[in-house]
Amino acid sequence: MFETLRTHIFNRVSMSEEDFNAGTVLMIPKKLRKRQYLLQAGDVCRSLAFISKGCLRLYSLDEVGGEHILRFGIEGSWMVDVESFKALKLANSNIDALEDSELFLMSYESWNKLSVAVPAWEHYIRDILAEEYNSAISRISDFMGASAEERYLHFLAIYPDLFQRVPLHQIASYLGITPQSLSRIRKEITERR
Amino acid sequence: MFETLRTHIFNRVSMSEEDFNAGTVLMIPKKLRKRQYLLQAGDVCRSLAFISKGCLRLYSLDEVGGEHILRFGIEGSWMVDVESFKALKLANSNIDALEDSELFLMSYESWNKLSVAVPAWEHYIRDILAEEYNSAISRISDFMGASAEERYLHFLAIYPDLFQRVPLHQIASYLGITPQSLSRIRKEITERR
DNA sequence: CGGTCTCTTGACGGAGTTCAAAGCTAGTGG
DNA sequence: CCACTAGCTTTGAACTCCGTCAAGAGACCG
């Protein structure tokens, strides 16, 4: 049941089997259907979510209703609106499922207890946060120095199978370009080889 | 001596005076002159740096030698190459001073001891990391949805006095545009009022 | 002073957007 | 099981923001 999570943790930090179980007993399984919200802007993000199967996106809306995908989450990654979860503030972002998905939720309260009781879990989550921070930084770096085509190629490197799983216009949104532009970039790439 | 740091911490987490001191005794003061490196790409980032006075920048270089400023740090903020510090890897980024600056350094070893011994410090740093993560996310959001002018206005809102302290071309680099474009944007803004 | 660093302005070009239309695909209900 | 519709993708044409190249004017410091 927790195999994906076990692998994810043990690859990163050393943790005893008991410590691992101390965390997993606090987790609640949840299934999400395609298009179903995990979090809607205006609500409070009360849980950390580990994705054991499927694909989610975190996105915000601009003044004219356009969606900006800030992050994809696939099996083996965590999803949370950090800003909202940290202080139980109202969220500015939305999280929904791009495929039927299976999650394990850990509530704010459970997480606070766990992080005090089991330092290994605190370290694990801090590690994840640092990783996410780094990938955010390299994405900023990408926006500053790379063309849309280069960003698309980086995306393919980071999420090798995602372009076959999610619609093109979602990927375009993640890259910060229009679907039309991404369509042309794809054409350009295939024509070159 | 540690007044800026004291304010910064006590605004964020509750911490006893003893816990606070347990951290500050581990910190080493350091002065940096304008243009002096705190970290050079290829070295390892072995310290967290709290800026009590001055201004630093963290930047990377692209293939053609262009500088991309990923972050400014002013008095009351922390500077570190997270990727390098986390696992003592070789850094891809540079950190240097834009003004004569005063720092307090906490070494990797000190930080590890402290975070185990004093959970309040661990929470504090985790909090900072989450804040930085959020500001990285909102910067990405900016690159996706906002024009260069809007990004400049956001920059002014976040760093109200920085545009008087650092050269225009550094700000342009932070915004991901050329100095020429920023010059024109500024002109445009002043002409409109 | 003289050189380096910084900022401004102009002309031109290109990457990506916007608007519009049409073809394609997949899901849904009759 | 087919037909229909909504969502997705592609393509074209015109336009726009910003980058590039180039030149010159201040400002600061040794």
Image (tube, coloured by chain):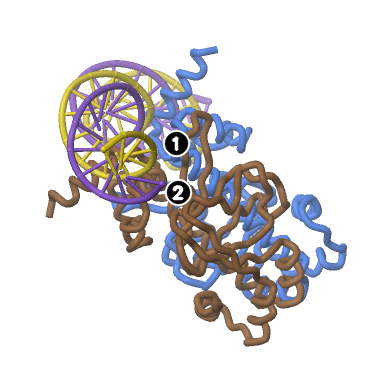
Chain colours: A blue, B brown, C yellow, D purple
Q: Nearer the viewer, residue A108 or B185?
A: B185
Q: Nearer the viewer, residue A96 or A61?
A: A61
Residue A95 placement (x, y as % from top left): 51, 55
The quarter of the picture where the C terminus of chain A appears is top right
Residue A88 placement (x, y as % from top left): 51, 72
User: Which secondary structure lies at badge 2?
Assistant: helix
User: Which secondary structure lies at badge 1?
Assistant: helix
The kind of residue on which mark 2 rests is Ile
Please tell me which residue is depicted at 43% across the width and 29% down the height of the picture: A182
Tag on residue A172?
1
Quadrant housing residue B108: bottom right
Q: Chain of mark 1?
A: A
Please tell me which residue is depicted at 47% across the width and 42% down the height of the picture: B68
Quadrant housing residue B124: bottom right
- Between label 2 and label 1, give the one nearer the viewer: 2
On the image, numbered disc 2 is attached to which residue? B140
Above-or-below relation of C23 to B14: above
The kind of residue on which mark 1 rests is Ala
Above-or-below relation of B158 to A71: below
